[in-house]
Amino acid sequence: MTALAVNALCKSFGGLQVTANVNLAVEPGERRLIIGPNGAGKTTLFNLITGEIAPDAGSILLFGQDITRVAHHRRPHLGMARTYQIITLFGNDTILRNVTLALLGLSPLRWSLFKDLDHQHELVGRAREALARVGLDGIADRPLAQTSYGERRRVEIAMALAQDPKVLLLDEPFAGLSIDERREVRQLLNAIPREVTVIMIEHNMDVALDWAERITLLHFGEVIVEGTRAEVVANPRTREVYLGH
Amino acid sequence: MRSGPRYAAAVAALALLVSLPLWVGNTYYINVASQILLFAVFALALNVLVGYAGLVSLGHAGLFAIAGYSGALLLQAGYGHLVANSAALIITLAASAIFAALALRSTGIGFLMITLALGQIVWGVAYRWASLTNGDNGVNVTTRPAPFGISLANAPSFYFATLVVFLVALASMAVFVRSPFGASVRGTRDQALRMNALGYNVWLIRFLAITFSGFWAGVSGLLFVYYNQFVSPQVSALTASAEVLLMVIAGGTATLFGPIAGAAIVVIMKNVVSAYVERWNLVLGVIFVVIISFMPEGLVPGTVRLVRWAWQTIRARPAATDAQPIEERRP
């Protein structure tokens, strides 16, 4: 069964069509790269898939279940997690609390008034494990304000992985990172278990080309080219749209 | 809380509060203390929204007034204190739910404007629907309740009753702040979109925070009506909403003790300083300007910051080493 299927999805902001009849079919465990120049509608596509914004037309299926009308906040409970291109974390809290909040979001405990969150050892323990997976367990108790940009990127990824998603959406996880930091993030991504379907947006084609199994090229909200790595690179339209010659 | 100096300070504060009628003596000042405590409950209630949920309401006096009027009118209709108070709180919860459903169509300035409008509607009803609310003349409450046979007619006994309610309110706030639900509410303040993406129902979390806040605003409204044995449209006016918001901001938002300090300042200005200075509003204004200029985070967190800074400066002077930057974080 297809992990994530997007059928004839459309979205316009006023007169500007940012998602034009997009079709996607991502198989379970697949590594899919979505590339495209600035303004191609990559992040909008993610926002539609995660339910942050509603589509004008079309449907979204998660493992065969139609989730087009499922509320934004219900989709993580169905196994969907995402990271943001612009780092979106809880700046007043520690690294550990950020990841704990990610776990709490899927726990019925989040409604509890008569418990002390700091004493939820099982939850906090799982948060520490998730931080260990991204190599941040040593600085788990550090306030987020005292962390570097690269560390915050890894916190973003740790929060998504902590939720144990079936489908993981990564929005430019390499943006703004140094070469060393990129290598670290790359190792993190390689360590994601094969059961997890991963879809990554990347603006810069070279960064994640060898990571991807299939690549979708978006341009002005439309799917221009789709196929294996070799097919997409060899396609003349890729060169035309993306490389500009 | 149980660690050394903090625990000692809490015990000392409690001892001071419990023994207050003894060392204050004068009935007038005992009444001022009762007012501080009941407005502190109101400010704590608003702080749930302003401090922890990041939703600034300018209509909270409306909820305060709905509880007060409901209680007063039911008492006037001949119902007992228990029935009148319970019904008043249920009505306030229902009103909070309506406030929430309407105001949560927006956040930020939009939320503020909708709550302001809702508060003005309550004021309009209190002022103009004279057949129900007796208009400008207000509603008299002839008796105070006598829980467990203890009459609350005199100032010290009413003070103790208010103190008990205040301590329960404070304890409920402490529980709320530490709870997973409290963390959820603060999360919606800091990153609403991210919270939805993590699986939190942001709308429902905010809705519940507003009703929690509305409940305690209602409790303080009932205390106020019993204190004055009278309720008039004035309690629902915009100035009343602004006053409690000033208490929260001046004392320190998103802190447990800030709203209490804010309530103390405003009530003392209104009742005590006004006896000596005719333009007490001016004094209050100057105090607020000073607080906002030198302690933009509020009086309580600001004082904590200054004390820590002074302490570290004194300790660092002989050695003149490892002076660490002070991190002030909101809980």
Image (cartoon, coloured by chain):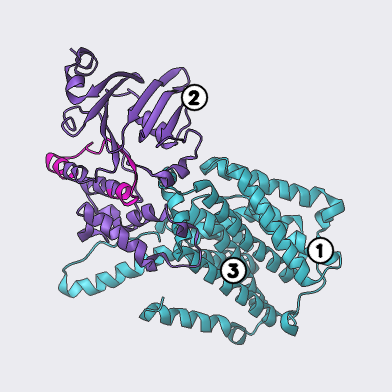
Residue B12: percent from the left, percent from the top?
Answer: 47, 83
Task: Provide the letter of the chain coloured purple.
Answer: A
Q: Kindly identify the amino acid type of the residue bearing the numbered disc 1.
A: Leu
Residue for badge 3: B268
Q: From this viewpoint, is residue A153 visible?
A: yes
For mark 1, name the chain.
B
Q: Is residue A61 above or below residue B275?
A: above
Q: Kindly identify the amino acid type of the residue bearing the numbered disc 2.
A: Asp
What is the magenta range? A158-185
Q: Quadrant of residue B155?
A: bottom right
Q: Distance between the residues labelled 1 and 2?
A: 52 Å
Same chain, labels 2 and 3: no
Q: In this view, does A175 lie above or below B258?
A: above
Residue A36: percent from the left, percent from the top?
Answer: 27, 23
Q: How far apart are marks 2 and 3 (CA)?
A: 58 Å
Residue B58: percent from the left, percent from the top?
Answer: 60, 49
Residue for badge 2: A56
Q: Are the residues flagged by discs 2 and 3 in contact, CB closer than 8 Å? A: no
